[in-house]
Image (spheres, rainbow, N blue to C red):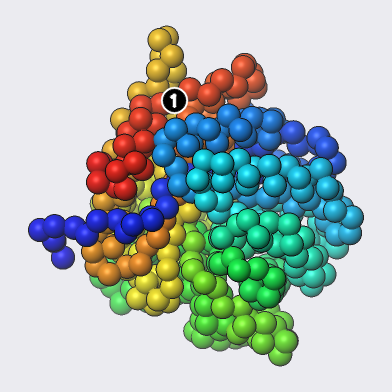
Amino acid sequence: MDYKSLKPFPEGFLWGGSSSAYQCEGAYLEEGRTLSVSDTAKVPEGTTNFNDGVDHYHRFKEDIALMAEMGFTEFRFSIAWPRIIPQGAGEVNQVAVQHYHDVIDECHKYGIEPVVTLYHFDLPQVLQDKYGGWASRQCIDDFVEYCRVCYKEYGPKVKYFLTINEQNMMALFQGAMYGSEKGQWQANHHMLVAQAKAMILCHEMCDAKVGPAPNITAIYPASSSPEDNLAAMDWDQLRNRLFLDTAVFGTYPEALLNWWKDKGIAPDITDQDWEDLKNGNPDFIAFNYYGAGTVKYVSEEEGKKMKSDTANFMTGLMTYPGMSTAVQNLLQERTSYGMGVDPIGLRVTLRQLWERYHLPLIITENGCGVPDKLEEDGTIHDDYRIDYLRRHIKACQEAITDGVQLFGYSPWSAFDLISTHQGITKRYGFIYINRDEFDLKDMKRIRKDSFYWYQKVCKSNGQEL
């Protein structure tokens, strides 16, 4: 549908940006913090680790002041579990508790709404060593107790909590660490139950709203063949609905669960698990979007060959034998890092989420990660980022005109931080951080062209694009 005019963004729409603790804070062993599984994971050769980040831990006041200058009304950030409870369970680190109070208070000082992620890829390493992390049901209880501390401390100040960031990406792409497919989906099930119990606890302890934060995208069939269309349905169940049907409806997608049972890899689910999933009841859905996916059918035999092809690592990761494999969409634009650029796909994704779940939506990640050049005069000209964000914001407005209830847009990222796979070279932020992969330089904060453009967007409530 093409509209002659679009509805305006609703009054009170949240304009902001996102970050995560392990990618930006630095201070990785300061003031009681212990290592997380992200700290100990192997980083790609030629890229930095997360030890120093962009020093947001020490410079959060400067960073939040810059966000306020841009006109942010929202800042999505995560609390580091290994900072709050260094041993993963037990004694609480009061220094860390106070630090996040200070961050939240600084946001409120400027009228910025904190949107707090409870878990963003940073399981305390001590729990991974102690019992295998999410492979154990003990991790459910420890996560819920960590959430209890966060709700007690920050519940009176925070209106929006996010449970687990991109659980689907962890489940799909880190499954090998659990030793088997059954182990992979059992660990994922433990996360789903932990999330449900965390949402139940939030409603018991706080007036805040709480919701999941997966990476969600529309799935296109590679062709009009019936097999590819079925593959797209199946991949949608595995990649998207597995993580939202469980959160919203308390049920697993039936075809997927039956297929797993047939293969003997279905997770063990207790009656109490079903009860907890049923009672989770999120208040909204947060989701991250970086371009729609395209899949084709792949047989069990062909898929196993693709999974074992070490020369094509990503194809192997995104292949599920007997179901589908991801393929490149030749009709979709791509960034220099190969990420899809598909603003229409964002409108499709918003429509699909709203029409299936009828819960308010907030976009918690969407952005253009590419290298930026610091000019000799100290400027950064990133018209490519402005163009990317402008087109996606327009897609949001089209979805709102379609009837979607979208209440916030929080692109990745508020400022440059350490990308999980491409280090600091891959930059997303409105604010340039003056450091290289292995040279910390002065970490000076520098406004990019996109900073001034987004300032107009925020202050005009999306009218000036």
Q: Could you tell whether 347 is left or right of 189 in the image?
A: left
Question: In the figure, is residue 118 to the left or right of 283?
Answer: right
Amino acid residing under circle 1: Arg
Q: Quadrant of the N terminus?
A: bottom left
> Residue 145: x, y in percent?
79, 65
- Residue located farthest toward the bottom when viewing the structure as drawn: 271
Secondary element type, mark 1: strand
Rendering quarter of residue 450: top left
Q: Can the viewer see residue 193?
A: no
Q: Which residue is mark 1?
A: 447
Can you see residue 9?
yes
Vertical side of 49 occupied by 170: above or below: below
Q: Residue furthest left?
A: 4
Q: Position of residue 323 (x, y in %)?
A: 47, 72
With 238 as the anchor, is 186 left or right in this view? right
Q: Which residue is at 62% across, 34% downward?
A: 60
Q: Residue at x 40, y 60 (%)?
A: 407
Q: Which of the pair 301/339 is nearer the observer?
A: 339
The residue at the point 70 percent across, 62 percent down is 151
Residue at image coords 56%, 60%: 159
- Quadrant in the rendering for residue 45: top right
